[in-house]
Image (cartoon, helix red, strand yellow):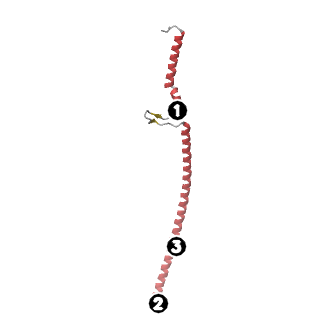
Amino acid sequence: MPDPSSPGTWIGALLLIIGFAIGTWLRIGPGKQISAMADAMLGTAEVKDRSGKVSLPAQPGLVHRTNTLEESVKTLIELVAEQRVIATRVDLHETRLNDHDTSIAALIASTFERGAHATLTAAEIQAAKARQEKS
């Protein structure tokens, strides 16, 4: 049995208490946060059970997720640019359709005008025939 009054016993007890305090602090305190930050930055490997099935899939690291986000933003920017081009085309087609509507309205008006003139001419011809028959 060690002597409780010896310095070695006190130093051993003090180291045990300090080790316990540090271990508890690392499990509960910022040590958990440091571990979480390391997992987030480096990623985690997949966890497999005894049968070889993946029970927890691998998590990519921060660099991979940042690259994926940047690629998504670039894709989004390209899609918005394409959408602008399409919107410009639609506006041009709408303008052309409005011009066509105006042209069609003018053609219809001139057709009616010609039809009215032809009707008057036919009426004049019938009136002339009627006058010839009377005479």
Instruction: From the image, state whether disc 1 or disc 3 is nearer to you.
Output: 1
Label 1 with label 3: CB-CB less than 8 Å: no
Disc 3: which residue? 110
| Residue depicted at 49% across the width and 25% down the height | 27
Disc 1: which residue? 39
| Residue depicted at 51% across the width and 19% down the height | 19
Separation (CA) of disc 2 from disc 3: 33 Å
Separation (CA) of disc 2 from disc 1: 111 Å
Identified by mark 3, the residue type is: Ser
Looking at the image, tell me whether mark 1 or mark 3 is earlier in sequence order: 1
Q: Position of residue 99 (x, y in %)?
A: 54, 64
Instruction: From the image, state whether disc 2 or disc 1 is nearer to you.
Output: 1
Above or below residue 70? Residue 124 is below
Looking at the image, tell me whether mark 2 or mark 3 is earlier in sequence order: 3
Q: Tag 3, which secondary structure?
A: helix
Q: Position of residue 85 (x, y in %)?
A: 56, 54
Q: Number of marks in the image?
A: 3
Disc 2: which residue? 132
Label 2 with label 3: CB-CB less than 8 Å: no
Q: Position of residue 87 (x, y in %)?
A: 54, 55
Q: Position of residue 10 (x, y in %)?
A: 52, 11
| Residue 48 numbered tag | none
